[in-house]
Amino acid sequence: MRLVRAVTVTPGTAGSLSLVEDYPEPATDEGSILVEALAVGVCGTDLEIIAGHYGEAPPGFDRLVLGHESLGRVLEDPTGTLQPGDLVAGIVRHPDPVPCPNCAVGEWDMCRNGQFTEHGIKALPGFARDRWRIPPRFAVGLDPALGRVGTLLEPTSVVAKAWDHIERIGHRAEWQPQSVLVTGAGPIGLLAALLATQRGLAVHVLDLATEGPKPALVGALGATYHSTKVDQLGFEPDVVIECTGAPSVVIDVMCQAAPTGVICLAGVSSGGRTIDLDAGALNRTLVLENNAVFGSVNANRRHWDMAAEALARADQSWLESLITRRVPVESYAEAYTPGPDDIKVVLDFAA
């Protein structure tokens, strides 16, 4: 049996991050497409798993291979879906085995019974290993031009889903949005802003940072950067995509949206914090202005394909600017240690 390197943790055990040199090569029952890993993106979910907050190893394994933001090159595909040498990313979530009504029709991002599995998170090995396998229906081919930035496909799929649902909700009535507010200029926020500019909307991004790369990245999109409070913006956005998860910001954007506005909550709050809230005033605002608030997470195949198209249309140099550090796999611990100016960190298997 061929052995590969893999970045792993023992789920639920803080401080268990390690690079295993003798992890078994993926078995064919993981998928018919064999892929050579090129890079894996690092995100907050990985850091929470490393901290022991959650994570689930595959059945029969004590350790979980990390990595859900993948980029690889096809080594073999006996199904002919992809060709050797093609760039590919693996869809993270797989449907539950029951399946629930949503999983049964390919909407596994909307799973209702929670029995889904996720690469690098829940009961499926992740992509942070030299080789991985994927079934054809979960393999997304990428434009060759995305060879340096393909790890951005997973977070882009999340905001592609958000925009898909925003537009569905918006069309409950005659809907002609003009302005978008994105709160948070991390990877999700910046990619949400990118997809907003691709829709020809006036884009505003709010973040606390006044230095570092974020203001320039927003400006390069032709968007407006703000580092003020939500209620000091001076306008009411038609669409809000909230990416911070900060409770006070979540409440503020609900009160700031324009009449018939759509507010998408894409940031996850950590919990354990309370704030003063006039629930009656918030209710009055949402009801009398016909506003809609919804949560969005994960993505299905349709959204991954939409994300691949969006990245292929984007300025490749701008996308590459989102990746602020590339760390060789031998120095894996550095990749999972946040830096002050990090936007997106990539663990490089091809270095």
Image (spheres, helix red, strand yellow):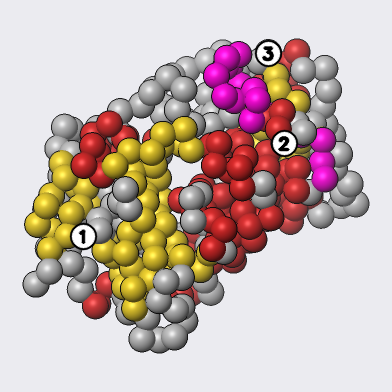
Rendered image quadrant of residue 243: top right
Query: Magenta span has 89?
Result: no
Judge whether 69 appears above or below 327 on screen: below
In the rendered image, residue 54, in percent from the top left (x then y), is placed at 27, 41
Whichever of labels 1 and 3 marks the residue nearer the N terminus, that label is 1
Cα–Cα gap, marks 2 and 3: 20 Å
Residue 216 in sight: yes
Rendered image quadrant of residue 133: bottom left
The residue that appears at 75% across and 31% down in the rendered structure is 223
State left or right for residue 83 relative to residue 128: right
- Disc 1 to disc 2: CB gap under 8 Å: no
State left or right for residue 100 relative to residue 195: left
- According to the picture, the residue beneath numbered tag 1 turns out to be 58
In the rendered image, residue 203, in percent from the top left (x then y), is placed at 76, 34
Residue type, numbered disc 3: Thr
- According to the picture, the residue beneath numbered tag 2 turns out to be 221
Whichever of labels 2 and 3 marks the residue nearer the N terminus, that label is 2
Residues shaded magenta: 200-217
Cα–Cα gap, marks 1 and 2: 41 Å
Tag 3 secondary structure:
loop
Q: What quarter of the picture does the N terminus occupy?
A: bottom left
Residue type, numbered disc 2: Leu
What is the crowding at mark 3: few (fewer than 14 residues within 10 Å), some, or many (at least 20)?
few
The residue that appears at 73% across and 43% down in the rendered structure is 196
What is the crowding at mark 1: few (fewer than 14 residues within 10 Å), some, or many (at least 20)?
many
In the rendered image, residue 126, in percent from the top left (x then y), is placed at 29, 55
Residue type, numbered disc 1: Pro
- According to the picture, the residue beneath numbered tag 3 turns out to be 228
The residue that appears at 18% across and 33% down in the rendered structure is 14
